[in-house]
Image (cartoon, grey):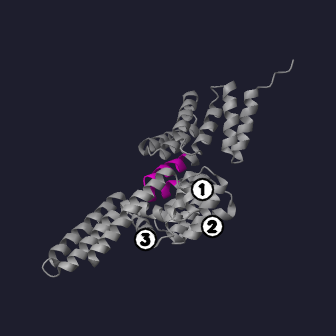
Amino acid sequence: MSERPNPGEALLQRGRLLLLHRRPADAERFLRESLAHDPLNAEALHLLSICLRRGDGREREALEFADRALAREPEWTALHVQRSLILSDLRRLKEAREAADTALARDPEDSSAHAALGYAFLRESRWAEAEAAAHRALAHDADDALAQNVLSQALVWQGKAAESAADVAARLARDPEDAFTHLNAGYAALRDGDHRQAETHFLEALRLEPDFDAAREGLLESFRARSAPYRLYLRYAFAMAQFSERRRLVIMIGIYVIYRVLIAALSTVSPVVVGALVVAYFLFSTWTYVARGVGTLFILSDPRARLALRPREKAEGAFVGGAVAAGLVLMIAGALG
């Protein structure tokens, strides 16, 4: 008598293939049906976690399924890697590094574990450590896609333009259908001041993965960069990103000390210059907090670009950007009066 086929296994196989073909939404449906037949299947739980992580704002649900899979297979390295990636997305970065370290303790030569650690460093703006982790991952597997993309971003944010451009170009030639590669190419273009090329890459990333939230954020950045003030802010942000958080703090303290020294030195020389210096420092110190809102205000003026905004972002542009615009008008009116 032949053995009856397992419907849960067939559904799992279908979900696995759909995920391989970059159709996570379709894969999710089959994986959930598979779990209805076998709720404790660790592979189905793991693959469903991967699908959910690729969705918009579903990281907590993805973590829940990863944890359920880990309860079944605590020694499975890939599950610790998956957990690390989700925790990085949730900005629980210490836990993300611990999960990656756990994966590495189980398999020190696993490229995905090194890449996950690099991804956590990347989310912490620890660019040099992210680059080093990516290189370790690629030493074990030169085709590791996550490691390649971590390396590209680390190079971009460290200002290693030539290395980054060569790396992104090579990977686009190898796999032009990789959404993460287009994301990195978009940010490389933004760093170079080419917001139109950046927009093209972010749109392509969203075509390949419509729920890719990082690409949507990048697209909004390219829209904001249509305005000259926001392009200046981006240059400043990219320049400051090359430094560690501690060094950035030292730089800001240094700028404030210089400002106070100049105010003291010029107070008896020219009140007009002192006033201009105060205004300039005020604009510099507050611009970081209002630049995004001002840039979003420019997006609101474009009928097509504003379609990419969510309600909260529209409110931010109208309130913050509108307040800054009104303030500038009042300052100019006061100066002329």
* SS at circle 2: helix
Q: Nearer the viewer, residue 194 or 48?
A: 194
Q: Is residue 121 magenta?
A: yes
Q: Amino acid at mark 1?
A: Phe
* SS at circle 3: helix
Q: Nearer the viewer, residue 208 or 178?
A: 208
Q: Residues within 10 Å of mark 3 (few under 14, many from 20)?
A: some
Image height check: is 320 above or below 109? below
Q: Amino acid at mark 3?
A: Pro
Sequence-first disc among 3 and 2: 2
Q: Amino acid at mark 2?
A: Ala
Query: Residue 311 appears at what percent x and percent y?
Result: 50, 51
Q: Which residue is mark 1?
A: 180
Q: Which residues are magenta?
A: 113-133
Q: Which residue is mark 3?
A: 229
Image height check: is 260 above or below 88? below
Sequence-first disc among 1 and 2: 2
Image height check: is 191 above or below 308? below
Query: Residue 52 appears at what percent x and percent y?
Result: 59, 40
Q: How far separated are the C-alphas under marks 3 and 1?
A: 28 Å
Image mark for residue 109: none
User: How many numbered marks are there?
Assistant: 3
Q: Which residue is mark 2?
A: 169
Which residue appears at 56% of the width and 46% of the height? 56
